[in-house]
Amino acid sequence: MRATVMYGPGDVRIEDVPDSHLVEPTDALVHVTRACICGSDLWPYRSMEPSETGQRMGHEFIGVVEAVGDAVRTVKAGDVVVAPFAWSDGTCVFCHEGLHTSCLHGGFWARDGIDGGQGEAVRVPLADGTLVVLPVGEDDALMPSLLTLSDVMGTGHHAALAARVGPGKTVAVVGDGAVGLCGVIAARRLGAERIVILGRHPDRIALAKEFGATDVVSERGDEAVERVRELTGGFGAHSVLECVGYEQSTITALSIARPGGAVGRVGVPQQKEIPTTLTTFFDNVTIAGGPAPARAYIEELMPDVLEGRIEPGRVFDRVISLDEVPAGYRAMNDRESIKVMIDF
Ligand SMILES: [Zn+2]
Ligand SMILES: [Zn+2]
């Protein structure tokens, strides 16, 4: 079968790899029909150590189940399924607490011998816990939005929950990438009264407004902080969603939370320390967040997608084939594309 393999910065190839097959009785074999490139795939694309053997890629996918192991009960051959960006058993103490990314028996795609989603097929471990059956056909028009349940929509929702978004709140979203845009959707869905998006790409800002952003701050650094303060009566936002992970965006996010507010961090931190520790301490700002337990949110968010209340699939502005994946990475890295979908 063919799959995406990364060998070093800017070096992504589509190659023949060994066919996926069932190994454990709890596995499912999924033939991938849609996948995508993630903003987090760009970190290794820019900075990975060159590797002789390469690194399989992809952690967001939808597919059709081809076969299941003897112990699998909740999915069967022919089912259309979505996979969250981490696999999990659904039965351990952390899965019961809704924190599937900390599953005692789970893990992540495209590492430790597990297939990546940017390939023709994936062996899915712990299929009963990991996969969710979609009640639509494999070519349904809702596929782009359903695919976001793998990661970016669940991650935006997680940021909003960590930032304690609720009715009447003023929310600030730092970052206008796919996760930030989904954060806007999530904030509106949870009843936010005012949603300030911090970003500067006109196409993304336009989409953010359609998703429910009420104000735009295009400044950066201290000027951005100043501007958000102006917009919020001098206090800052109740809830701040940090959807980037850079040191500067984290400082901005922490600096625009009002006293007693909360910051939900879902951008993978690119620095070792949490900045602004003294101000956030004296302002009683809650700092929460981490990798989203996307699996925990699929059942909650899916009805809103199926019934058309949210359209997170609009973050995909380019559709490519598997062969075009290297060009897809380039387009996202060069900011020519918000998010790229692979249609197999
Ligand atoms: Zn992702
Ligand atoms: Zn678990």
Image (tube, rainbow, N blue to C red):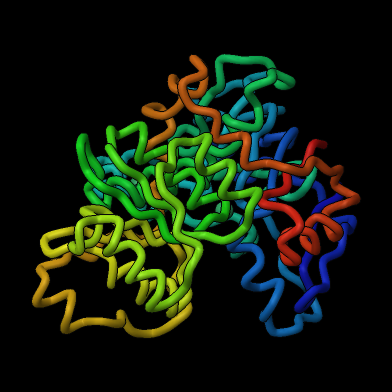
Numbered-mark total: 0
Q: Position of residue 336 (x, y in %)?
A: 76, 57
* Placement of 303 over or under 126, stated as above or below: above
Residue 115 in view (yes/no): no
Which image quarter is the C terminus in? top right
Q: Residue at x 77, y 78 (%)?
A: 8
Residue 104, by quadrant, is bottom left
The one nearer the camera, 289 or 28, is: 289
In the rendered structure, the answer to whether residue 19 lies left or right of residue 247 reads: right
Residue 214, by quadrant, is top left
* Placement of 312 over or under 113, stated as above or below: above
* Placement of 240 over or under 166, stated as above or below: below
In the rendered structure, the answer to whether residue 231 lies left or right of residue 207 reads: left
Q: Residue at x 33, y 84 (%)?
A: 273
The one nearer the camera, 201 or 53, is: 201
Q: Position of residue 310 (x, y in %)?
A: 48, 27
Q: Residue at x 40, y 69 (%)?
A: 224
